[in-house]
Image: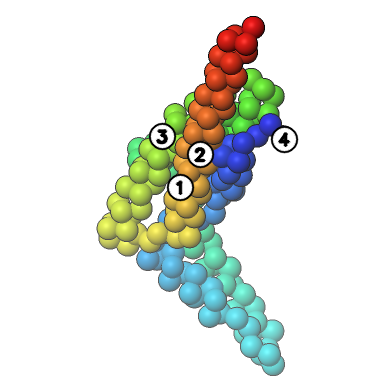
Amino acid sequence: MSRLTRGHAIAAVAALLLLLVTAVDWWSSDAGEDARRTEGLAQPEPGEGPEQRQFDNDIRSDASIQAEQAERNAWQPDGALDLVVLLLVLASVAAALAAAALRAAERRAPPGAIVAALAMLAALAVALDVVRTGTEAGGQVKLGAPLALIALAALAFGSARAAREDEGEERAATADGARTSAAG
């Protein structure tokens, strides 16, 4: 792990966080948000009878089910754009983790610029999906989508930094080689 540059480490951590964020809710609907509010309001009060507590529990349970049906995360694509988003996010995660693992193993890693470009493309797809969902009648953007944009930005930043660091190391190695040849 000590072979990782700071850029590779940033990109790898961002990739792992992005993978976690894919499980957080990204989208909902107005009906789903109303169901979540109902679920929060249907709390049993102290001193209520067993029938009222059961009634409140039934309402909370029904509201929870309705909200869950309206909410989606990245693993639940609802159309072609959502599928493209998922594939680009997964490709970004895989490329960043592969680059870090190969760097740690002192193998040739995918160029950081390519990983950064892939992450930026994924961020653009997420942003388009956010705009589409936000402008749909009844569409609600949840916490997962903005968190994914932040993680993708960090992944792109780390990958771009890794590319600069790798380039600097290559220049230094070339200069060392030239000095060794001239001295020899």
Q: Residue at x 47, y 37 (%)?
A: 160
Q: Determine the secondary structure under disc 2.
A: helix
The quadrant holding residue 183 is top right
Q: Earlier in the sequence, mark 3 or mark 4?
A: 4
What's the CA distance linking mark 2 and mark 4? Answer: 17 Å
Q: Determine the secondary structure under disc 1.
A: helix
Specify whether 24 is left or right of 130: right
Q: Nearer the viewer, residue 128 or 121?
A: 121
Q: Earlier in the sequence, mark 4 or mark 1?
A: 4
Q: Residues within 10 Å of mark 1 (few under 14, many from 20)?
A: some
> Where does the image place residue 142, in percent across and percent down from the top left?
45, 60
Quarter of the image with the N terminus in it: top right
Q: Earlier in the sequence, mark 3 or mark 1?
A: 3
What's the CA distance linking mark 4 and mark 1? Answer: 24 Å
What's the CA distance linking mark 3 and mark 1? Answer: 11 Å
Residue at mark 1: 153
Specify whether 137 is left or right of 42: left
What's the CA distance linking mark 1 and mark 2? Answer: 12 Å
Q: Earlier in the sequence, mark 3 or mark 2?
A: 3
Discs 3/2, front:
2
Residue at mark 4: 2
Q: Earlier in the sequence, mark 2 or mark 4?
A: 4
Q: Nearer the viewer, residue 179 or 98?
A: 179
Which amino acid type is marked by label 2?
A: Arg
Which amino acid type is marked by label 1?
A: Ala
18 above or below 83? below
Residue at mark 2: 161
